[in-house]
Amino acid sequence: MIDVSLRQLELFAALTNFTTLSTAAAHLHISESALSQAITNLERAVGAQLCVRRKARGLTLTPTGQEFARKARRILADTQELVLSAGEGKELRGPVKLGCYSGFSTSVIPELLEGFPKRHPEVTIEFMLGTNEELCTALDAGHLDVALVYNVSLPAGYSRRNIYATELEVHLHPSHPLAQAATVDLADLADEPYVEVDAAPGVRNVTDAFAARGLEPKIAARVTHISLVEAIVGRGLGYGLLMSRPNAAQISAEGRPFVIRRFDPPVTVSHVVGIWPEDLSLTPRASALLDFAAERLGGKDEPAAAAVSAPAQGRSVNPDS
């Protein structure tokens, strides 16, 4: 029988987050020599080199080591679920590690933090904000159970569940002539000053949307934060193009109002989705959180859909909004 402990698996699985053995040891609260010995013992047990340790070049996992770390994380997660479910009964308990795209986090996280614990008081939510790329990396490393992202340009290998539909909308100052219309045509904005969210791939998607109509936006300012777009719009210095968000207040951080109008014809349409690695199963707690998110954020028109594995869809969308 191979003598490998859960502690060894835990230590090795964590190595993917560090470039040197010393930093890994410090984070794991273990001496560098003890960590090195644990790795050596593990390699002897499995009969393969799992990592390369060089003082000048740091720590690198071999291809075998990378696959071993991935499977070790799965074993650790399954073990945690085994322990939690043994005394769970009908009541869910334990943590959910949730990732959320930073661009719409203020419209999503407060709702979940307020409502979900009331339904499942024994479940705690730990969350991380980031870009799609950062969240996918965290999912692959086992740091997150599930992540909420825009369903655009996602790499293969993730299961997904629709949470709510979203579309590009225009943000206008209340005194703007188009603010009185029920809907806006993108062509009507071509000569207006545009406050751009300067982050890829949103810039290209908006440019493509204008180009599809034979138009080009007149960029007045480039910013990296949605709140700054809203603040500039609130001062009447231009319009913004942002994806629709639940619970979005039509007032800037400075307390100045703005109005939001839909496009007719629609410009970009997509979904916010929950994603997780397709080779892993959602924990009951993470599944319940996605159900709750779809119910509270999607409303009656967005029931929780069955989990599916699908390639990234090619719709144009501004995921940095």
Image (cartoon, rainbow, N blue to C red):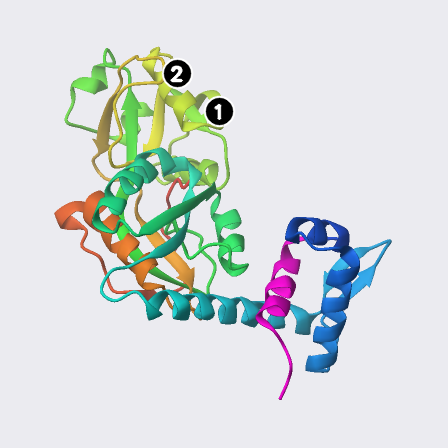
Which quadrant does the N terminus fall into? Answer: bottom right
Task: Indicate whether residue 11 is drawn in magenta.
Answer: yes
Q: Quadrant of residue 274?
A: bottom left
User: Considering the numbered disc 1 on the image, is that residue within a helix, a strand or a loop?
Assistant: strand
Q: Are marks 2 and 1 in contact (CB under 8 Å)?
A: yes
Q: Which mark is residue 232?
A: 2
Q: Is residue 313 visible?
A: no
The span picked out in magenta is 1-18
Q: Left or right: where does residue 198 sit relative to residue 118?
A: right
- Residue 44 in percent (x, y) is at 74, 79
Amino acid type shown at disc 1: Val
Mark 1 closeness class: few <14, some 14–19, many ≥20 residues within 10 Å: some
Q: 106 and 119: which one is in front?
A: 119
Most common secondary structure along the magenta stretch: helix
226 over 73 or under it: above or below: above
Q: Quadrant of residue 173?
A: top left
Q: Residue at x 72, y 82 (%)?
A: 47
- Residue 17 in percent (x, y) is at 63, 54
* Residue placed under numbered mark 1 in the picture: 223
Q: 118 and 255: which one is in front?
A: 118
User: Considering the numbered disc 2 on the image, is that residue within a helix, a strand or a loop?
Assistant: helix
Real-space Cα separation, disc 2 to disc 1, in angstroms: 10 Å
Tell me how many marks there are: 2
Q: Residue at x 49, y 28 (%)?
A: 224
Q: 212 and 72: which one is in front?
A: 72
Q: Which mark is residue 210?
A: none
